[in-house]
Amino acid sequence: MIYAVKKMFQDIAPHRYKNEYTPRPPRDGDRLLCFDGDRLLCALDAENRIQLPPCGGQAVQYLFSIDDTGYFLHEGTPLPAQAPYGYVPAKSLRGSFADETRFAAAVGGSLHRWYVQNRFCGCCGAEMEKGTEERSLVCPKCKNTVYPKLCPAVIVAVTDGERLLLTKYAHAPRNNYALVAGFCEIGETVEQTVLREVMEETGLTVTNLRFYKSQPWVYTDSLLMGFFCDAVGSREIRRQESELSEAAWFLRDALPTNHSTDSLTGEMIERFRAGLE
């Protein structure tokens, strides 16, 4: 059976995401992203679509636009919740209706964390100021400049003929199947990250690396880069127990379906199932 691949999280066409740093005042129709810690002020309609409040006259920071709608981050003390809006854990919104508003909420959450975590200079302790020509935070004293957090990471589909290696993370909140994954370390290429992560997590050696696609996974402030590769040498798995609760080979026609449906991981699993790799 061939399973249809759903759109990935960032695929919001025909809507257009405009992330150029071109700050402007709010206009009618713009939306507000107001966070209280890790909770977002919003409402969910009958179809589980996220509804964001309009952007009023409060202190706000322009973030980006989707089509002609601007999205602004509320600054200062969180606003009181007024019906129909309430504070909802941002992580729970990942399961809401997949549209451009869900994407905007997740990207806004990443930028919110960046602003909160970099209020003060890591070099001299002075309070940071917003850059005027680019999206940055600049120290007025020592000129230390900080840019939005973006962590490069790899997603690796290890294949062995008609078999695909699937894993489960040891400490993940969901019990979904996934692929080998990990963050790039200082001083290594992305390709070296693939080799290291596969060896560390499974004890396998791989070759014939093939870059597939990337994904901005803003839930963890990451940029994911997906690779297919072939196992070489011993196929015996030596699972890294501190990272994985499961690691096993699955035949193409017996792949499980309990994996994420809007991520690079899910798309790569379904691509292998369909015989495209």
Image (cartoon, grey):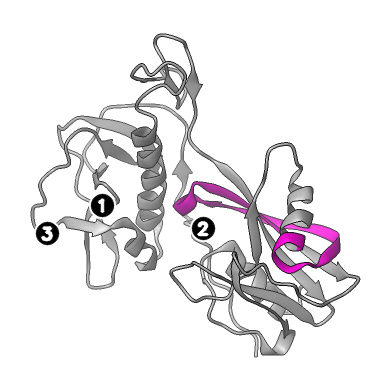
Residue in the foreground of this view, choosing between 139 and 247: 247
How many numbered badges does the structure rendering display? 3
Task: Looking at the image, tell me whether mark 2 or mark 3 is earlier in sequence order.
Answer: 2
Where residue 108 appears, as percent x and y from the top left, is 37, 44
Give the amino acid type for the residue marked by disc 2 in the picture: Asp
Which residue range is magenta in the image?
Answer: 199-227
Residue 7 in sight in this render: yes
The residue tagged 1 is 40
Q: Extreme right residue here?
A: 233
Q: Measure the alpha-carbon separation of dots 1 and 2.
A: 22 Å
User: Which label belongs to residue 84?
Assistant: 3
Q: Secondary structure at mark 2?
A: loop
Q: Is residue 98 magenta?
A: no
Looking at the image, residue 130 lies above or below residue 265: above
At 91% across and 71% down in the image, what residue appears? 233
Please tell me how crowded label 1 is: few (under 14), some (14-19), or many (20+) other residues with Cα within 10 Å. many
Classify residue 54 by image quadrant. Answer: top left
Looking at the image, residue 12 lies above or below residue 252: above
At 52% across and 75% down in the image, what residue appears? 176
Where residue 7 appears, as percent x and y from the top left, is 53, 66
The residue tagged 2 is 11
At 35% across and 55% down in the image, what residue appears? 101
Where residue 34 appears, as percent x and y from the top left, is 24, 44
Looking at the image, residue 129 lies above or below residue 110: above
Residue in the foreground of this view, choosing between 169 and 75: 169
| Contact check, label 3 and label 1, Cβ < 8 Å | no
Give the amino acid type for the residue marked by disc 3 in the picture: Pro
Q: Secondary structure at mark 1?
A: strand
Give the amino acid type for the residue marked by disc 1 in the picture: Leu
**Left or right of 55: which side holds 249?**
right
